[in-house]
Image (cartoon, helix red, strand yellow):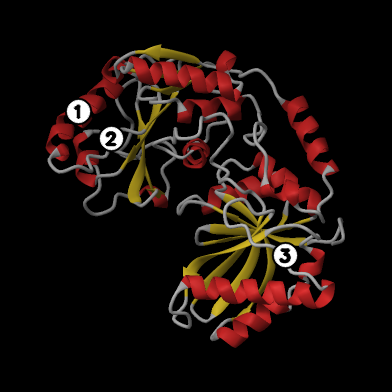
């Protein structure tokens, strides 16, 4: 492939973060940025693949778009896949795997659709080279993704490998209750740029505060990991080395305090461990403190918290009192601050007892949530609408008030 030819790229994301991801891509200088449901398309050269993997904070995965067309039956899908110039993509000796996202009535199972694409790929390379590539479902050199929707199909190449939420600092087997990509999305939706003091008073293992430190320090989130595209034989590796060097040079000290606190001493230890591994321990303070005794780290602080959602049977009634006390603590202990809560239950949101000036629908995995903004006035509130409220912040029926 031509190293300078424009490539069609797709960055996927959690539902609700499409506009934030699109803004990230525009800020990075990419062209033809178009947001879709759960993804953003854009264009760039081969160097853009490395930069996007390295810098995108809210993207789940980066993919190279290879082909798109009719997939109304097996023959149509085979023809679409066979037309891809796989000889320019798969180097001799490399292994491949095919997975499927989405579904189509044309195929009884996604496994059948994956087999059709694999056969087309293998047949083309066997005809051209006289030898077929091996399949490795566990650790392939190239991971082909078939996306099915109705009678259409897209064929893409996974450029990330591990999801981009895996920043490289968290031990395997220790997933975060909140994906790092969603945590970064919360910060960007709240307008955080590192200039104001920040507090997560229910930090758990530190995910949101660490993402805040990465943002404040201008540290690329992918600096401590590798990517699937590094195994692509057609991709020049030099731009990645250049991008990493540039990212290290851009790093700065956090301009304002970043504080994470939790009442659980084990969570505090884990947050400190993760902050060290992420390279941001010097940029943040981790303290053991109950959320109801929260202490803003400075005037005009931004507070973001992800309180429990009450998913288990009977938890809602127990948590209702906690949410009420949380609202009281914010009002009494953080005047002049702006607080945002990611809430997965509308009834619990009402228990906070504060009027939300903005309500942004998001998904934390399969859970539909609202990201609620509370303007904690230092004095009597002026008017009934919160600072920064727009049409998007109009109260919905049954929402918190």
| Location of residue 36 in the rendering, given as x and y in whole percent from the top left corner | 54, 62
| Horizontal side, residue 240 vs residue 342: left or right | right
Q: Mark 2 or 3 closer to N-term?
A: 3
| Numbered disc 2: secondary structure | loop
**Cα distance, mark 2 to mark 3?**
48 Å
| Location of residue 212 in the rendering, given as x and y in whole percent from the top left corner | 53, 28
Front in this rendered view, residue 10 or 390: 10
Where, quadrant-wise, is the N terminus in this rendering? Answer: bottom right
Q: Mark 2 or 1 closer to N-term?
A: 2
Image quadrant assignment for residue 279 = top right
| Residue at image mark 3 | 133
Q: Are marks 2 and 1 in contact (CB under 8 Å)?
A: yes
| Residue at image mark 1 | 322
Where, quadrant-wise, is the C terminus in this rendering? Answer: top left
| Residue at image mark 2 | 308
| Location of residue 124 in the rendering, given as x and y in whole percent from the top left corner | 75, 76
Q: Are marks 3 and 1 in contact (CB under 8 Å)?
A: no
| Numbered disc 1: secondary structure | helix
Q: Residue at x 47, y 37 (%)?
A: 183
Q: Residue at x 84, y 49 (%)?
A: 236
């Amino acid at each position: 492939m031509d190293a300078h030819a424009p490539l069609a790229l797709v960055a996927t994301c959690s539902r609700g973060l499409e506009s934030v991801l699109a803004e990230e891509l525009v800020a990075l200088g990419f062209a033809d940025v178009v947001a879709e449901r759960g993804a953003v398309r854009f264009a760039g050269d081969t160097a853009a693949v490395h930069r996007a993997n390295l810098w995108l904070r809210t993207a789940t995965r980066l993919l190279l778009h290879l082909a798109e067309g009719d997939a109304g039956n097996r023959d149509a899908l085979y023809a679409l896949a066979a037309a891809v110039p796989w000889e320019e993509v798969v180097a001799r000796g490399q292994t491949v795997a095919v997975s499927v996202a989405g579904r189509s009535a044309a195929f009884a199972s996604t496994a059948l659709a994956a087999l059709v694409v694999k056969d087309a790929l293998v047949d083309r390379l066997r005809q051209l080279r006289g030898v077929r590539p091996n399949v490795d479902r566990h650790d392939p050199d190239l991971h082909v993704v078939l996306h099915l929707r109705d009678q259409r199909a897209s064929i893409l190449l996974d450029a990330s490998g591990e999801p981009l939420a895996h920043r490289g600092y968290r031990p395997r087997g220790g997933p975060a209750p909140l994906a790092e990509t969603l945590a970064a999305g919360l910060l960007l939706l709240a307008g955080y740029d590192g200039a104001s003091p920040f507090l997560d008073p229910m930090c758990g293992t530190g995910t949101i505060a660490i993402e805040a430190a990465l943002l404040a320090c201008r540290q690329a989130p992918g600096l401590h990991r590798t990517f699937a595209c590094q195994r692509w034989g057609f991709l020049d590796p030099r731009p990645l080395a250049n991008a990493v060097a540039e990212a290290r040079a851009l790093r700065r000290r956090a301009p304002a305090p970043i504080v994470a606190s939790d009442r659980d001493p084990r969570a505090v230890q884990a947050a400190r461990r993760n902050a060290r591994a992420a390279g941001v321990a010097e940029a943040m303070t981790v303290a053991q403190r109950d959320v109801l005794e929260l202490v803003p780290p400075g005037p005009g602080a931004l507070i973001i918290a992800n309180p429990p959602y009450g998913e288990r049977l009977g938890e809602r009634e127990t948590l209702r009192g906690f949410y009420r006390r949380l609202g009281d603590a914010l009002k009494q202990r953080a005047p002049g601050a702006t607080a945002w809560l990611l809430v997965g239950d509308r009834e619990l949101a009402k228990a906070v007892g504060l009027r939300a000036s903005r309500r942004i629908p998001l998904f934390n995995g399969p859970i539909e949530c609202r990201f609620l903004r509370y303007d904690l006035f230092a004095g009597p509130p002026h008017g009934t609408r919160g600072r920064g409220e727009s049409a998007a912040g109009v109260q919905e029926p049954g929402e918190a008030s």
